[in-house]
Amino acid sequence: MRKVKNIVIVTVAILCVLAIVIGIILSKNWTIRFHSELNRFFGEGNWECIDQETKESMIYDDYIIVHSNPAMSGDVPGKFQNWYIQFKNRNGEDEIWHITNHTLKINHDEYGIFSPKRYSQKQAFVLELMDISFSLAGDEIWKEFIQSLLSEQAADCFEVAVSYTGGNPEPEFYDDLWEQPWFTANTVTAGDYLSCDLHDFYLEIRAHDYRLEKLTEEEYQQTVEALPDIEADLLEEFGYSASFTIYFDGELWAEYVDGVKQ
């Protein structure tokens, strides 16, 4: 009887250790740890992880200790993971984006465990989704206000994304952002960010100089003439929430904050 009891105890202990080890391994894979959150953001059944990779960081180091040969102890490049996710956007087109724990690793390297600026894994994960949503919302603006007014060649000179002022948000901001019902890949709009009071957001519209240089003189002049219309359309669309910058030909062409020209 005692032998059986000992076997049961050992088996339970082994299973507990295995469960802990498996839990640690799974917690490091964000597509598993945050599976339900990814379902909410991209849509259940609307996404899949198609690849992942481990890379070395050029920003932070890890210190390793080699007990058998202390002289070999020292700093080595820190490692982080990228996960590549494919999903269908609101137009039914396949897109591939990636999320990474690199920002989390950098943050934890910079701030101690009791620092109010230290991210939780969930907060760093939401930050990654926010960056994706910035580009998705910006792409909708590009289609509606840039592509509709310019030739294909001229429109391709511009890039639009949501950004923010006032420095990086506090970690708790990402908890609040996650609670917003509009914060999903296929419903988020630039207007959601511009009208919310979680942080100071604005649209950054930028024409890349190296692309402008490829336009003909006629295309360039047509683009210049269209800029006031783009500005007016954005003001009409967003009203008092209209905060945006337009950079053209290496200069700040227009800047608005809450519908007021700066």
Image (cartoon, rainbow, N blue to C red):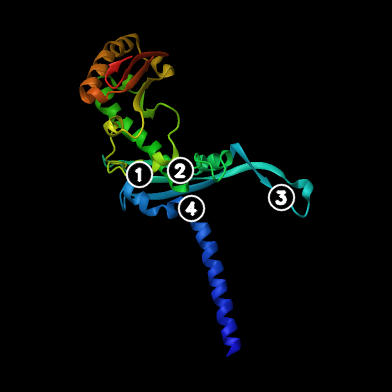
* Residue at far left of view: 236
For the residues carrying marks 1 and 3, which lies nearer the camera in this image?
1
- Measured as percent of width and height from the top left, residue 119 is found at 48, 43
The percent coordinates of residue 157 (x first, y second) are: 36, 21
In the rendered image, which quarter is residue 261 located in?
top left
Using the rendered image of the protein, determine whether residue 140 is visible from the camera's viewpoint: yes
Label 4 SS? loop
Residue contact at pointers 2 and 1, CB within 8 angstroms: no
Identity of the amino acid at label 1?
Answer: Trp
Q: Residue at x 30, y 42 (%)?
A: 180
Q: Residue at x 57, y 79 (%)?
A: 9
Sequence-wise, the earlier of marks 4 and 3 is 4
Q: Amino acid at mark 3?
A: Ile
Marks 2 and 1, Cα distance to the nearest angstrom? 11 Å
Q: Is residue 219 above or below residue 10?
A: above
Q: Is residue 144 above or below residue 29?
A: above
Please identify, in this view, whether the residue under mark 4 or under mark 1 is nearer the observer. Answer: 1
Describe the element under mark 2 as helix, strand or loop.
Answer: helix
- Please identify the quadrant where the N terminus is shown: bottom right
CB within 8 Å, label 2 to label 4: no
Q: Which element carries disc 1, helix, strand or loop? A: helix
Q: Which residue is mark 2?
A: 124
Q: Say the numbered circle drawn on residue 178.
A: 1
Mark 2 or mark 4: name the one nearer the start of the chain.
4
State the mark number for residue 9. Answer: none
Earlier-in-chain disc, 2 versus 3? 3
The numbered disc on residue 29 is: 4
Residue drawn at x 49%, y 57% as measured from the top left: 26
Disc 3 designates what residue?
65
